[in-house]
C-alpha cells in the first residue's frame, strides 16, 4: 500500500516519530494562520511540527467568503496600513498559487442613497488600487449607468447611477491552507490532523512541551518543543486559558458570518458584485462559481459553542433580503438555498465597538510562560502574519544562545511556489490546462472535469490522472474514474481521513455541488473503506457523520426565524 508522508495512512507513524523528536517550534492550529507559519518556519530551517485538533482548515479557514482581497470596506474605516498590506499581499499569493488564487473582476454598483457617490467611489477605488500597487491594466474602471447595466442587467435600475469595476482574487480557502501545509511538509515540517493539544508541559515555569491526543485512536503523545505558537483562530483564548500563566487583558471578540448558496440560474449574475445593504450599510458579496451563486456575509456577535457555529434562518433571510433589494427580479427565497456555511472571525476585542467596527488587523500576544498567540487578521494577509510570528519566534529562540539559531535564513515565502502552483505566468497555467485537457480527452476522460481539477490541484493533477488509469481503468464512467482517483489523491497526498475531509475541505463539494452528492457518497465511502482498511462499523460511522453535515447545511430552513 502506498505511504506518502502526507498520507492518512502515515498519520500514526508521524505521531510516533514526533514523540521521540525535539522540535524548535510546535504550531497549534491547522487553519491558514498555522499553515502559513509552518511553511515559513520550516523554510527558514526550524524543525517544525503542526497539530490540528480536527481536519486541516476545519475552523474559519474553510468558511470565509473565499476572496483574496484588500478589503475595500476597511478603506472606509481608514485602515490604510491594513489595506496597503493585504492589498499588496494579494499579488504575492496569486503569483505563488495561480491555480487556486484567480483574478476576479468585481462590480461595485453606485446607487442613490448609497454610502459613496460617483466621485467618492471613483476616488476610493483609485486609492485602493494605488495602496495595493495594482498593475495599470488591472486598475479600476468607472462605468456609466448604461454600461453598468450591460454588464449586469439584473441590477436594480431605479436607483442605479453607475458602477466601478476593480480586481480582486477568488480562492478556495481550505485548498489554500492545504497547499501551504503540503509545501511545508515537502520541506520537512510534520503536519498532523486529528491531533488535539490538550495540555502544556513546563520546565521552570516556561512551556517546554505539550500533550496531544490523537482523536481518531484516542492515544496521547508527549511532545518536546522549544517554542509553541498558538494559532487556533477562534480558540486562541481557550488555549491561553489552558496555559498556567495569567493571560493578558487582551481577548478575542468572535463574530459570526454566514454564506448561502443558490443555483446560478436563480441569480444568474455574470461576475462578482459587491454592494451596500440598504439600511445598515454593511457590504454584501454575490459571487458566481461552478454552477452556483453564493452570497454573504453577516457580522454578528457570537457567544455560543465555538465548535459549532450554524447558519440560522434569520441570518439567511438577512442576506436574501439584501440581495433581493439589489436584484429585484431574482425573488430569492429560503427554499432556493441549496447549501450554506457559517464561520467565526477571531477578532481582537475593542471596548464599545460593534462587530463591523472591529479592526481586522492581526496581533501577537505573549505569555510569561513563553506561549506566543496570534489572532485577528485575514486569510489574505496570512503570509505576512506568518513572517511576523516566525521573526518573533526566532528572536526568542536566539535568547537560548544555541548556535543553531544563529544562521537561520530570512523569510523567503514571497518566493515559494505552493504545491501545485509552479507556474511562472498566467500563460503558463493556461498552456498547462489546455495541454492536459487535450491529452485526457484522447484517453477518454472528460475535458470539463479535468479543467476543474487543474484549478484545484495545479500540476498535481498529473498524479490524479495517472492514478485514474493505473487503479481505476476498469471503471467505465469516465467522471467516476476521475472522482475515485481524486479521492485516492486526497487520502495519500492530503491526509483525508473521512468523507467530510474530502467532500467539504479538499473539494468544497458539500457547498457547491451538494445536489450531486447523494449518488456518489456511498461509492466514495466504499472506496475509503478499502483504502483505509475500515471495519463495517467505521464505514457506517463515517457515512453517518457525513450525512449529519449534509443535513446541517440546510437545517435552518426548518428553523423559526429568530434564535
Ligand atoms: C464569514 C467570514 C468571511 C471571511 N472572508 C474572508 C475573505 O474573503 N478574505 C479574507 O482574507 N479573510 C476572510 N475572513 C477571515 C479569515 O477567514 C480568517 O481570518 C482566517 O481564516 C482565520 O484563520 P486561522 O487559521 O487563524 O483560524 P482557523 O481557520 O479557525 O484555524 C484554527 C484551527 O485551530 C484548531 N484548533 C483549535 N483548538 C485546537 C487545539 N486544542 N489543538 C489543535 N488544534 C486546535 C481548530 O480546529 C482550527 O482548525 C473571513 C472570516 C469569516 C468568518
Image (spheres, grey):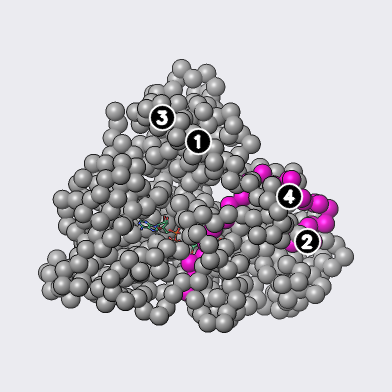
Work out whether 330 lies above or below 124: above
- Relative horizontal placement of residue 28, taking residue 211 as reference (left or right): right
Q: Mark 2 — residue?
A: 326
Closer mark to the observer between disc 2 and disc 4: 4
Q: Residues within 10 Å of mark 4 (few under 14, many from 20)?
A: some
Comparing 330 with 230, the one in front is: 230
Comparing 538 with 421, the one in front is: 538
Q: CA distance from mark 1 to mark 3?
A: 10 Å
Which residue is drawn at the image coordinates 57% and 63% (left, top)? 256
Q: Is tag 1's residue or tag 2's residue first in the polypeptide sequence? A: 2
Q: Mark 3 — residue?
A: 537
- Relative horizontal placement of residue 359, taking residue 188 as reference (left or right): right
Q: Of the numbered discs in the image, which one, if any, rests on residue 56?
A: none
Q: Is tag 1's residue or tag 3's residue first in the polypeptide sequence? A: 3
Q: Residues within 10 Å of mark 3 (few under 14, many from 20)?
A: few
Q: Is residue 333 magenta?
A: yes
The quadrant of the rendering that contains the C terminus is bottom right
Q: Of the numbered discs in the image, which one, if any, rests on residue 544?
A: 1
The segment highlighted magenta reads: 322-348
Percent coordinates x, y for residue 546 in the rendering: 51, 39
Q: Circle 3 sits in a helix, a strand or a loop, which is it?
A: helix
Q: Mark 4 — residue?
A: 334
Comparing 93 with 385, the one in front is: 385
Q: Circle 1 sits in a helix, a strand or a loop, which is it?
A: helix
Q: Circle 4 sits in a helix, a strand or a loop, which is it?
A: helix
Which residue is drawn at the image coordinates 44% and 22% (left, top)? 472
Q: Residues within 10 Å of mark 1 (few under 14, many from 20)?
A: few
Amino acid at each position: 500500500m502506498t505511504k506518502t508522508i502526507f498520507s492518512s495512512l502515515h498519520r500514526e507513524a508521524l505521531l510516533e516519530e514526533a514523540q521521540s523528536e525535539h522540535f524548535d517550534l510546535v504550531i497549534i492550529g491547522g487553519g491558514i494562520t498555522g499553515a502559513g507559519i509552518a511553511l515559513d518556519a520550516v523554510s527558514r530551517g526550524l524543525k517544525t511540527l503542526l497539530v490540528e485538533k480536527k481536519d486541516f482548515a476545519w475552523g474559519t479557514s474553510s468558511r470565509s467568503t473565499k476572496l483574496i482581497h484588500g478589503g475595500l470596506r476597511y478603506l472606509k474605516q481608514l485602515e490604510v496600513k491594513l489595506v496597503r498590506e493585504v492589498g499588496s499581499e494579494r499579488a504575492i499569493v496569486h503569483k505563488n498559487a495561480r491555480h487556486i488564487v484567480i483574478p476576479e473582476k468585481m462590480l461595485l454598483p453606485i446607487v442613490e442613497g448609497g454610502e459613496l457617490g460617483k466621485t467618492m467611489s471613483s476616488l476610493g477605488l483609485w486609492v485602493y488600487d494605488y495602496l495595493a500597487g495594482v498593475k495599470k491594466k488591472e486598475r479600476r474602471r468607472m462605468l456609466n449607468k448604461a454600461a453598468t447595466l450591460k454588464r449586469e442587467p439584473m441590477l436594480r435600475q431605479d436607483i442605479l447611477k453607475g458602477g466601478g469595476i476593480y480586481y480582486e482574487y477568488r480562492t478556495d480557502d481550505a485548498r489554500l491552507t492545504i497547499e501551504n501545509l503540503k509545501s511545508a511538509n515537502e520541506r520537512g515540517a510534520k503536519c498532523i490532523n486529528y491531533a488535539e493539544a490538550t495540555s502544556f508541559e513546563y520546565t521552570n515555569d516556561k512551556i517546554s512541551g505539550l500533550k496531544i491526543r490523537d482523536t481518531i485512536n484516542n492515544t496521547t503523545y508527549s511532545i518536546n518543543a522549544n517554542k509553541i505558537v498558538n494559532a487556533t483562530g477562534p480558540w486562541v483564548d481557550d488555549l491561553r486559558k489552558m496555559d498556567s500563566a495569567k493571560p493578558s487583558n487582551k481577548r478575542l471578540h468572535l463574530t459570526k458570518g454566514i454564506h448561502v448558496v443558490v443555483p446560478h440560474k436563480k441569480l444568474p449574475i455574470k461576475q462578482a458584485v459587491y454592494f451596500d445593504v440598504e439600511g445598515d450599510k454593511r457590504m454584501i458579496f454575490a459571487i458566481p462559481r461552478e454552477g452556483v451563486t453564493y452570497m454573504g456575509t453577516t457580522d454578528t456577535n457570537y457567544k455560543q459553542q465555538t465548535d459549532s457555529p450554524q447558519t440560522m434562518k434569520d441570518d439567511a433571510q438577512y442576506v436574501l433580503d439584501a440581495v433581493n433589494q439589489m436584484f429585484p427580479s431574482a425573488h430569492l427565497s429560503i427554499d432556493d438555498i441549496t447549501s450554506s456555511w457559517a464561520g467565526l472571525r477571531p477578532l481582537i476585542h475593542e471596548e464599545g465597538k460593534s462587530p463591523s467596527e472591529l479592526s481586522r488587523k492581526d496581533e501577537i500576544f505573549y505569555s510569561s510562560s513563553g506561549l506566543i498567540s496570534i489572532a485577528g487578521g485575514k486569510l489574505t494577509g496570512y503570509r505576512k502574519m506568518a513572517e511576523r510570528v516566525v521573526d518573533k519566534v526566532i528572536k526568542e529562540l536566539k535568547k537560548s544562545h544555541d548556535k543553531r539559531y544563529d544562521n537561520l535564513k530570512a523569510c523567503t515565502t514571497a518566493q515559494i511556489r505552493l504545491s501545485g502552483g509552479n507556474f511562472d505566468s498566467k500563460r503558463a497555467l493556461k498552456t498547462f490546462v489546455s495541454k492536459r485537457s487535450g491529452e485526457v480527452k484522447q484517453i477518454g476522460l472528460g475535458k470539463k472535469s479535468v479543467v476543474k481539477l487543474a484549478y484545484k490541484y495545479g500540476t498535481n493533477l498529473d498524479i490524479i490522472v495517472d492514478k485514474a488509469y493505473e487503479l481505476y481503468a476498469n471503471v467505465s464512467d469516465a467522471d467516476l474514474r476521475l472522482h475515485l482517483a481524486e479521492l485516492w489523491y486526497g487520502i495519500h497526498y492530503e491526509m483525508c481521513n473521512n468523507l467530510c475531509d474530502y467532500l467539504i475541505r479538499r473539494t468544497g463539494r458539500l457547498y457547491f455541488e451538494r445536489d450531486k452528492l447523494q449518488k456518489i457518497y456511498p461509492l466514495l465511502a466504499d472506496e475509503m473503506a478499502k483504502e483505509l482498511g475500515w471495519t463495517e462499523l467505521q464505514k457506517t460511522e463515517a457515512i453517518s457523520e457525513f450525512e449529519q453535515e449534509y443535513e446541517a447545511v440546510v437545517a435552518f430552513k426548518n428553523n423559526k426565524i429568530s434564535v
